[in-house]
Structures are given as structure tokens and as C-alpha cells.
Amino acid sequence: MPWLGLWKGSLMRTRREKVLRGLCASPGIAVGEVYMVDRENPSVAAKSIDNDKIDSEIEKFHRAITEAKAELTELKTKVSEDLGDGHAMFLDAQLLVLDDVAVIKDTENKIRKERRNAESVFYDTVHRAIKRLSSVGDSYLRERSADLEDVSRRVLCHLDRSCVLSFALPEKEVVVVADNLSPSDTAKLHGHQVLGFATQHGGTTSHAAIMARALEIPAVVGLTHELKDIQDGDRMIVDGNRGIVIVNPKEPTLRNYEQDKKRYERFCERLMLLKDQPATTFDGRSVELSGNIEMPGEVTTAIARGAKGIGLYRTEFLFLATEKPPSEEEQYAAYATVAERVYPESVIIRTLDIGGDKITENISEPNPFMGWRAIRISLSEIEFFKQQLRAILRASVKENVKIMFPMISMIEELRQARSILEETKVELRKRGIPFHDKIEVGIMVETPAAALSATHLAKECDFFSIGSNDLTQYTIAVDRTNERVAYLYEPLHPAVLKLIKMTIDAGHDNDIWVGVCGEMAGDPLAVPVLIGLDVDELSTSPIVLLETKKIIRGIHSDEARAMAEKVMLLNSPEEIRSYLREQLERKFPDLAKVLFDDGED
């Protein structure tokens, strides 16, 4: 029969082993049967409504908001009960949108004025905020747009009852495969027999990825291959350590991964033993190890993985998630929550670090990355700046809050920012509002100008925190979000390392401490070099804190200095990376096996 041959050929093609590459979203190894989640986005069409239907349309909109809030509140309660309050607080971002008076009023007014259906108006309103977030240079903030997409979908599905909001999971062990998973989708995986998941879209700092790590579900996102060839029932390996998905693996591959899985589980058990150990080198030199966060709920994860305080609290999401900038009270509530949760350890709060096009629609710049942004906005919009400073100062009453100014490129900017801070202190004193008068003030060193001027800047601040992500981009003149040139982005470039060394030396010569808060602080190849350059603090993503601590505790200061000296003599990023990988494999073979596939490419 001709069809039998076709069926056999199709079956053979389906079962052929295929390796797909993506991004490591949540560590671990899962092996199981594929369950495909195929869900279309809500269809939103603009429709005219009659004058006599406007009030009922607005009533329908308010009902949808109320129902969405009730669902999110219920989900938040469940996640809090199962995983703790900290892991549920990402849902506050979505509830914040539903409580945003500006969003509600803007939608109401446009329904009346334009006589347009609620679905279309609400979609446009929320997607303006999504567009703002999606175009931000910071990958952490860009991925917060998924939260707005999630809440938008929820409200739209209540407005249009034909929309399917969620998906059902089978009562058996599966690996979920989807185009994308929303943060609330991922939260619902808890309690089901989901071994792991893989998605074509999504990023490593999205709340879906953060939730996967909290649930300890291996996950790979951003797959470079389309999912159309994957079917329900296929066998799949999800390798969250290396960002690899293997469809229909052969028996030898399965056996190898079974060994990898056991080895990784033993590795994780040993890592967790380090949680409460100090971040000190083999010879006893202490390195402050902190976590980077952008929302109060992430403090719990950072502390659970051994962070000693928060070395970078990004405040931008408060300003980008809603139509209207947060009030002083809303900012104070967020900052005070973090300060309370980390006490007696400290939190460094970075003032607003976004482009002007994100806070007003009247700004359009050909190159916002080099334009009116960060401290430049704050120094131009003084009352706007003072409002944030007041909120930070008010949250500092327990004396564990520090302020950090971003994108300082000249000493006049630092002086002006400090002058405005002093004015704000005077105003609070007159009103009898308590704050920490001797609050530490530092700057992010993220421009070559700041690194080259570090000796002068160090005399007028209390600490430096090197923002290695932007310092790398500005030094090499490369936008890592641009796929055509992203390959040039290399934090281990000799020029970047020289600027980092210059900054650390200048800080120490002027008796101030120096930290690194970019991704480099958690890069296992870079950590020994930074220790060798005598950095005082490393602040990184909570997911890599324990691995970073392992490297700190396993290396001698003299050995790290020798590695740094060697690296400073090398001429290319390739030479530097090759040398450091060789040293990591020699010094930390178990970590290298997890990262580098048994030490081989």
C-alpha cells in the first residue's frame, strides 16, 4: 500500500533526533513526553457603538476589570501559599495596571469620545505601555512587557467571552512546549506533573522564567527553530543548564542525559550547602555578594540564594508599567518594602535610568541610547527628580539604604545631583519627616568618560558600582540588542577590562569601595578576574548567586591576581575567554561540566 510507505517515512522523520538551541531560563534537566500548548491571541477589532450603548459598554469594561482583579488576587493567594509571598509579588505588577486610575479613565474617556468598543480602546491603551517597555535598552525591563501582555489578555478575554484565557494540562507527566508562556501561565504549572517547558519566545529575565526557577522546573526559552515539527507525544529532553532541547533523542543520548541529570542534582545539593556560608576567598578575603532586583518580590529569591543585601534595585518598572508615573507614596511603599525585607543588610536604590521617550510622548530622538536619559532627565526635571529622592530618603530611616546615580559622565552632573539631594533633605527636615541624614551616595560607572575620570569622581561620592553591560556597549560602540552587531558585544574585551581596572584602582586610591553590578558579576569566567582586580562587591542575578559564591570561596586571592595579570597582557577577547575557560575547567571541573557540556564545545 503506497500510504503505508508514506506513513513509515513520516514516522521516521518525526522520530529523528533533533537538537534545538535557545536560552537557559531555568536550570535542570527534564526528560518526558511533549504536550503542545497552542493558543491564539485574542482578536481585537475596532467597532463603533451607538450613543445609547456607551454607558453599558463602560459598565462591561468595569466588570471585566473587576473579574480580572478577582482572578489575579486568587492566583496570588495560591502562589503565596505554595511558594511564599515573595514569589507571588510579580502579580502585583499586573494588579497595579488594573488599579491604574489613568488607564481606567483614559479608556472610559475614549469609549465616550470615539464611540469605540472597550476591547479596542483598552488594547490600545495598554499596548502603548507595552511599546514603551519593549523599546527599552535594558533587557530586564523589556521583558516586563510580558506582564502587561498577560494582564491585557486577561481583561480582553473577559470582554470577549469567546476568548480562551488559559489551557488545561493532562493528568500525567509532560514537557510543555509553547510559542510562549505568560507569567500567570507559568504560575499555574505548580501542582501539575510538568517536568519542564520549552518556548519559542521569551527571555531569561522574564517573570515566566523567574517563576520557573522558583518552581524548580527546567526551562529553555527563545528557541531558534520553529515548533511546527514538534508533536504531542514526542519524546523531549529539556536541558536548562545549556539552553538545549533535544526532540526524540536516541537511546545513547537518553543514557548520557540520565547520568548528567544525576550529576547535576548532586552538584545542586552541594551548592545549596553554600547558601549561609560567607563569600570569602580561600585565603579569607571577603567579597560582598549581593542581588539585583527590579521589584520588591524578588528580594525573597535573592536572600534564599545567599545574597547579602541588594546591590542594584532598578526603579524603572514603577515608571513604565502604567500610563502615569508613580506618586511619591507609591514609590516610597516599594522602596520601604525592600529596605524592610533586607534589613539589617543594605539596598542600593538606583534613580531612574530610562530614556526621555519613555516618560513623554513628545520626545523622539534618533539615538535615545546616547540622548536625553537617566541622570540627564533627572537634572532637567528637578521636581520629578526630587519626588523620587524624597521617596528614597523616607525609606532610609533604618539606615540601610544607599542612593546611586546612573550614567554619570562628568563631575558637574554628580555635583548637581548631590546639590539637589541636599535641597531635598532640607525640605524634609522642615516638614519634620525622618530620614538617614548620612545616607551613602554612589554612582554607576557605565561610560568610558566616568571610568577615565574616576580619580576625580571618587573624591565626591561614597562608592562606585560598575555597570558592565552599558560600559561594554559604550566602549565597543555596539548595541547588543541589534542582531547584526550583537556578536561584537564582549565584556571580556581588553579595553573594557582596562577601564574596570582603572575604576577599581581610582576608587581604592580615594578610600571608597567599588562593586560590579552588571551581568559580568555573575559570569563564571569573569568572576576570578574581578576578584583579582580587587573588586569589593559583586551584585548579580539571584539565579547565579550560589555559583558565584562557589567560585569566590574556591579561589585564593593570589591565584586570582595572577589570572587578572595574565588576562591584562592578552590582546583579544578570544584569547582571554579561552584562557579563563581553561582555568575554570582546571579549578572547578564540576561547574565546568554543567556549563560547557563536559568541557567540550
Image (spheres, grey):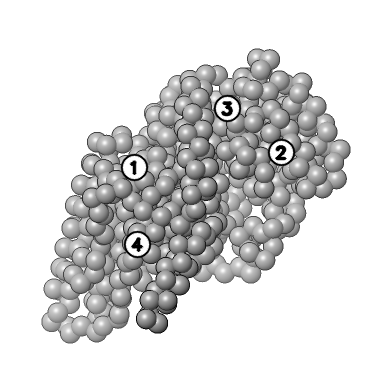
The image position of residue 483, as x and y in percent, is 63, 64
The image position of residue 357, as x and y in percent, is 53, 63
Q: Quickly name the residue at label 2.
A: 581
Q: Quickly name the residue at label 1.
A: 89
> At 52% across and 38% down in the image, what residue appears?
260
- Which of the two labelled residues, at mark 1 and mark 2, occupies the earlier sequence position? 1
Q: Quickly name the residue at label 4.
A: 232
Callout 3: helix, strand or loop?
helix
The image position of residue 212, as x and y in percent, is 40, 45
Callout 1: helix, strand or loop?
loop
Instruction: Give amino acid for label 1.
Output: Met
In this view of the protein, which residue sits in the foreground, 562 or 441? Answer: 562
Q: CA distance from mark 3 to mark 1?
A: 26 Å
> At 60% across and 33% down in the image, what residue appears?
591
Q: Residues within 10 Å of mark 4 (few under 14, many from 20)?
A: some
In this view of the protein, which residue sits in the foreground, 134 or 225? Answer: 225
- Which of the two labelled residues, at mark 3 and mark 1, occupies the earlier sequence position? 1
- Which of the two labelled residues, at mark 4 and mark 2, occupies the earlier sequence position? 4
Instruction: Give amino acid for label 4.
Output: Asp
The quarter holding residue 1 reads: bottom left
